[in-house]
Image (spheres, rainbow, N blue to C red):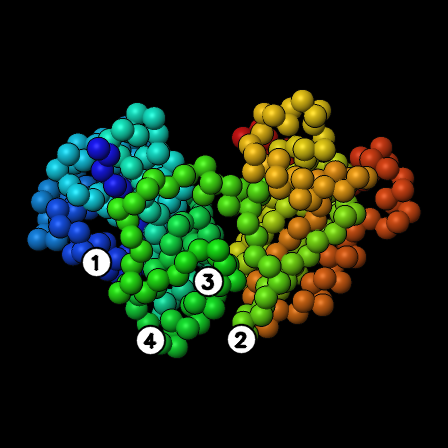
Amino acid sequence: MSTPVALVAGLHCSARTAVVDRLLAQHPEAVAIHHDLRAVADGRVERVIRDRSGVLERSQVHLAHGCVTCTVREDLLPGLVRLAGTASLLVADLWDSVEPRSVAEAIDCDEARGTLRLTAVLTALDAGRLPDDLTRGERLAEVGKPAAAGDQRYLAEVLARQIEYPTGLVLHGGDEQDAELSRDVLTHLAPFTPVHRITGLPGVLGAAVCTAELAERVDPATAQLPCDARTGEITTLVWRRRRPLHPARLFDAVDELVTESVRSRGRFWLATRHEHLLAWDAVAGIVSVEDAGPWLAALPEAAWEMVSPARRMAATLDWEAEVGDRVQHLVFTGPDLDGERITALLDSCLLTREEQQAGPGAWAGYDDPFGPILTLQEIA
């Protein structure tokens, strides 16, 4: 019978450790494995295995290439398999800046499926630090939390992904006011994910988690995006339209859009890339724009069978006769958000009726400041 595995992620080390300690205390014969990546840039990782009585094993792991992927492939996964026969529950205590998705998908593999059963993906959060950390623009290297040599990710960027992917969120630390504010924030950023206090952790011994479904919740084409909402000072605004965006006008508006909100994401339709679904991802003033593949309307109908049912369902829900599944669907969240200002700014970036009537052939000739960014990503 397969051994259940719970992943516990989180930039907030004290909160994450408290959750791991709680799981070990609640489940006799549970074992936790943690990889300390502070020296990963030098190809060295410290592995610590412990149970509720204390440390069972501490050793240095030397990797050919210092990165999270190597650590998971070369040591975490084999380590979990080795421990599976001796533990009632395995807890993967992830390093601060590790995003849980890559680890979850590595564990949910054919080679380990008969031995390991991924049952929970939790992110532990310090209620006293969460709201402020989502607004911080420092890179991980600047705060001593890189997960690899040359790690250029931002602290707020990683924190947002740790919040939006897992099966459950756990708040620890801070006072009641901090907890209330953090719950409000999480209600906006991850409205479909249950939030727990450490005294009420979810069950972790049940059925296997489907990592494909978790991925669909956050992938641009199928993401379960928040709805319009207002909780106290926090507002979430949904902007949906059916006309393409003018690339130059949108590019000029980017700085204002990302500074007006703390978090924004979604999918959008750029006139110069009529066939391509583009992904928008911004947090703490840092924005990323990526090509997420073709709109289904750009594919021959026979190719629809090659995409996932969730992708087909999302496209069907967005479908309109003239444009197919092409849509502007962006979501902005922040304190005291000026929704009218953001809406007016985005609407001003849409093609005018006259520009729209000119058609894709004319749009292709527009100046496109996003072109070099997206072309560079394609080359990389």
Disc 4 crowd, CA 10 A, few/some/many (<14, 14-19, 20+): few
| C-alpha distance separating marks 2 and 3 | 13 Å
Q: Are marks 3 and 1 in contact (CB under 8 Å)?
A: no
Looking at the image, residue 207 sits to the left or right of residue 50; the answer is right
Residue that badge 4 annotates? 175
User: Please, what is the three-letter code of the amino acid marked with disc 3?
Assistant: Leu
Q: Which residue is pictured at 29% across the width and 37% down the height?
A: 117
Residue 218 x, y percent position in the rendering: 51, 45
Q: Quadrant of residue 374?
A: top right
Instruction: Give the label on residue 186, or none.
Output: 3
Instruction: Give the label on residue 232, or none.
Output: 2
Of residue 159 and residue 210, the one placed in the foreground of this image is 210
User: Please, what is the three-letter code of the amino acid marked with disc 1?
Assistant: Arg
Q: Earlier in the sequence, mark 3 or mark 4?
A: 4
Q: Secondary structure at mark 1?
A: helix
Residue 154 x, y percent position in the rendering: 45, 52
| C-alpha distance separating marks 2 and 1 | 32 Å
Disc 4 or disc 1, which is closer to the eye? 1
Residue that badge 1 annotates? 22
Looking at the image, residue 68 sits to the left or right of residue 291; the answer is left
Q: Earlier in the sequence, mark 3 or mark 1?
A: 1
Disc 1 crowd, CA 10 A, few/some/many (<14, 14-19, 20+): some
Question: Which quadrant, please, contains the C terminus?
Answer: top right
Disc 3 crowd, CA 10 A, few/some/many (<14, 14-19, 20+): many
User: Please, what is the three-letter code of the amino acid marked with disc 4?
Assistant: Asp
Q: Earlier in the sequence, mark 2 or mark 4?
A: 4
Viewer can see residue 357: yes
